[in-house]
Image (cartoon, coloured by chain):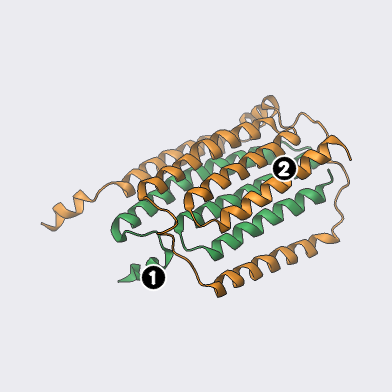
Amino acid sequence: MPIQSYLFLSFSLFAIGVMGVLMRRNAIVIFMCIELMLNAVNLLLVAFSKVHGDPGAQVFVFFIMVVAAAEVAVGLAIIVMMFRKVNSVDINILNRLKN
Amino acid sequence: MSLHDIIFWILSLWAIVCAIFVVISRNPVNSVLFLIATFFAISGHYILMNAQFLAIVNIIVYAGAIMVLFLFVIMLMNLNTDTEPQKSRLVHFAALISAGSLLLVVLSAFRKAELTQIPVTDAGDIGLIKVLGKTLFDHYVLPFELSSVLFLAAMVGAMVIGRKEVVEEKSTK
């Protein structure tokens, strides 16, 4: 396959992720859409690493996965804490964090 | 149309349809399951590009660990369609328009780019574990070790955030 197909696929997945972040109010689903965007970028990095013959990009993808795992652990802990306080995962609740 | 092309189109269609269902399904548990399906499609793409190491890591780390974590949290909170907050129709429409225009802008920017015509799915040995391991431990040892510190920090941070606040009550007494 030419690289253009992978560009199109990755951009589509990324746009769907952006749409989910804008569309949903559930904090966990928004988090999942961010994971989707990360995966779209990973796919494109691997495609370009194949084109240029550079294994460095795949190592970079590996590090992205590492950081994503750490990020999910901390992020879900924050969401669980928020749920324990206000009994909801609606992001509109976050408006009231100031008071 | 070769076998590679057919598999590519099937996997692409699978990934995009499942990604759309992640966004539009009302029940968060269904969203997680569709996201796992999307990750399997992306792993299939990695195998198609002969990036075997990343395909396995993607399945183990994303579909195995991260998504199970999401599923646990959703089941712990007992979220379902009834408790799902919904935005108004207008916001849905605006999100669709803005994401679509983002896609349009990026694609039109890349349409005339002079990209290489080398096919991506040529079998190469870049994605094999041997090559990646050598690269990782020759050039990227420091980030590798730092990521272990990051994991330790994330582990401690998740525990500190997630525990019940006993200390605060004691200090207020």
Residue under disc 1 on the same chain as residue under disc 2: no
Chain A in the picture: what colour?
Answer: green
Q: Where is residue B48 in the image (x, y as percent from the top left)?
A: 75, 35
**Which residue is at a point 76% across and 54% down the rendered structure image?**
A8
Tint applied to chain B in the drawing: orange
Q: Which amino acid does label 1 sit on?
A: Asn
Q: What residue is shown at x 66% (from left), y 26% (from top)?
A: B129
* Outermost residue toward the bottom in this view: B90
Residue B77 placement, left or right of A15: left
Q: Residue B17 carries which label?
A: none
- Horizontal and vertical percent position of residue B38: 62, 45
Q: In terms of secondary structure, where does tag 1 sit? A: helix
| Dot 1: chain letter | A
Of residues B53 and B141, the one nearer the viewer is B53
Mark 2 falls on what kind of element?
helix
Residue B75 as seen in the image, left or right of residue A71:
left
Residue A75 lies, in percent from the top left, at: 43, 51
Image quadrant where residue B54 sits: top right
- Position of A37 compared to A2: left or right? left
Residue assigned mark 2: B11
